[in-house]
Amino acid sequence: MDRTAYFRIKKMSPQFLVIDMDRSIEFYTRMLNFDIDFRYEEFYAGISKDGCSIHLKLGKPAPEERKNKSTNQDLDIVFSVESIEDLYEEISNRSIEIVQPLRGMSYGKEFYIVDPDGYIIAFLEETTKV
């Protein structure tokens, strides 16, 4: 009899390859208010905000892949948030590239930014269902 063991996922952390670790940490901590969870030597780090995390690994993101994702606005990560208008205003006042301005969609309001390595980060406030 084939059985699959039950397991519970406690956390998920996508990994982004970054060209300059210090620059990436600076972006996420100063611009988006993430905290540094850990840093392993000079090539690996974990950052988080409100229980959501990203792992950063020193490497070379494929330029062609980054360009294609940017052209198509293929998202690398989506954060569901509250008070999206306030967040958009705050981000608009910082030196952060906004690749999709705040817009209303059938599923909620969203906007996209890009980090220093070209990763597209979406912020979404989902429409509440009544």
Image (tube, rainbow, N blue to C red):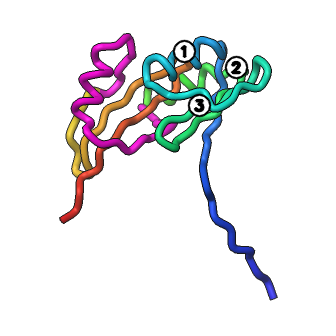
Q: Residues within 10 Å of mark 1 (few under 14, many from 20)?
A: few
Q: Is residue 35 above or below residue 126?
A: above
Q: Is residue 121 above or below residue 63?
A: below
The kind of residue on which mark 1 rests is Glu
Q: Residue 64: x and y, percent? A: 60, 22
Residue 21 quadrant? top right
Residue that protrudes farthest toward the bottom in the picture? 1
- Give the SS element for disc 1: helix
Which of the two residues, 76 or 5, is positioned nearer the viewer here? 5
Please tell me which of labels 2 and 1 falls first in the chain. 1
Q: Which residue is disc 2 drawn over?
A: 60
- Give the SS element for disc 3: strand
The kind of residue on which mark 3 rests is Ile
Q: Which residue is disc 3 drawn over?
A: 47
Please tell me which of labels 3 and 2 falls first in the chain. 3
CA gap between label 1 and label 3 equals 11 Å
The residue under the point 59% across, 31% down is: 47
Q: Which residue is disc 1 drawn over?
A: 26
The residue under the point 36% across, 23% down is: 99
Give the residues in magenta: 73-100
Please tell me which of labels 1 and 3 falls first in the chain. 1
Which of the two residues, 77 or 30, is positioned nearer the viewer here? 30
CA gap between label 3 and label 2 equals 19 Å
